[in-house]
Image: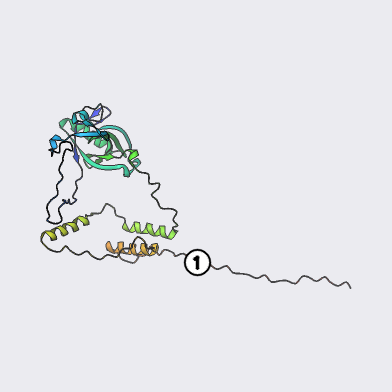
Amino acid sequence: MSFGLVTIPIKVVPATESHAISFRQVHTEDGGRIRYRKICELDGRQLQDDEIGKGYEVSKDTIVAVTDEDLAEMPLPTAKAIEIVAFVPAASIDPVRIGTSYYLQPDGQVAGKPYVLLRKALGRSAKVAVAKFALRGRERLGLLQVKEDALVLHTMHWPDEVRSPETLAPGEVELSVDEITGALALMDTMTEEHLPALSDRYRDALEEVIAAKAAGKEPPAAEDSEQATGGEVVDLMAALNASVTAAKEARGETDDDADVHNLPTKKKPAAKKTTTKKKTAAARPKKAS
């Protein structure tokens, strides 16, 4: 990794791991596994992994072979190094552009001092480092920041890879001040100082289903849950008040202030009073004496 004239030998280590449960494809009649075989369409022979290379399809009948040596020898500064190209305010990064995360581990004793130097400099600023590097056959954009005593590299999407949300938002929607105030009150009730400890309930439930079927038992029945369907017209104020009450109960708080700060309800406009003007008799001219 390099920034300016400083070079840091590093190793890239995955910062996350997947705990998702993987399935195999099986024949539904006898449970036999279905495997994918890599067959050459020209000679019909099944190939081993060491016989398979990369190729780019230029046209329907033309494929250009690209070897690992071709990729390694490309005249690209980032082919073998993470090149820091700029330091920017952390708040300027759009979270939508951030992808997979990797820890950067110093590689060898010589890497220790420049690694700590960069870590301390980033840690004392409100900035992050923007870098370019090559990974899996393409040049990528990356974001460097500090996590505890380590440097973390996040892959980033290039600007043209991020879709515009312009056409995704709904049309004009009328919201009352009470509804917005209610949403803010619910946010206050659900606010935590730190990210709470959360767990993957879907994975837990799936493990129970697998364990039950492996033991020849019926999977546990699903609990009934009352949820509004997408087509229902929801009373927002009632839903907000109920949500605040549920959030307070979940936190073990009293229900004294469960309502959304006794939000005012919309008052119907008062009927206009109709006033009738009294007709006054026109002044009669005095008779001449």
Q: Which residue is mark 1?
A: 268
Q: Amino acid at mark 1?
A: Lys
Quadrant in the rendering for residue 213? bottom left
In the rendered image, the vertical position of residue 230 relative to residue 20, given as above or below: below
Q: Position of residue 170 (x, y in %)?
A: 41, 53
Quadrant in the rendering for residue 90? top left
Quadrant in the rendering for residue 221? bottom left
For this orientation, the residue located farthest to the left is 215
Q: Residue at image x 32%, y 44%?
A: 96
Q: Residue at image x 14%, y 35%?
A: 51
In the rendered image, the vertical position of residue 285 relative to residue 161, given as above or below: below
In the rendered image, the vertical position of residue 222 relative to residue 287, given as above or below: above
Q: How many marks?
A: 1
Q: Nearer the viewer, residue 44 or 267?
A: 44
Q: Position of residue 204 (x, y in %)?
A: 18, 57
Q: Position of residue 58 (x, y in %)?
A: 27, 33
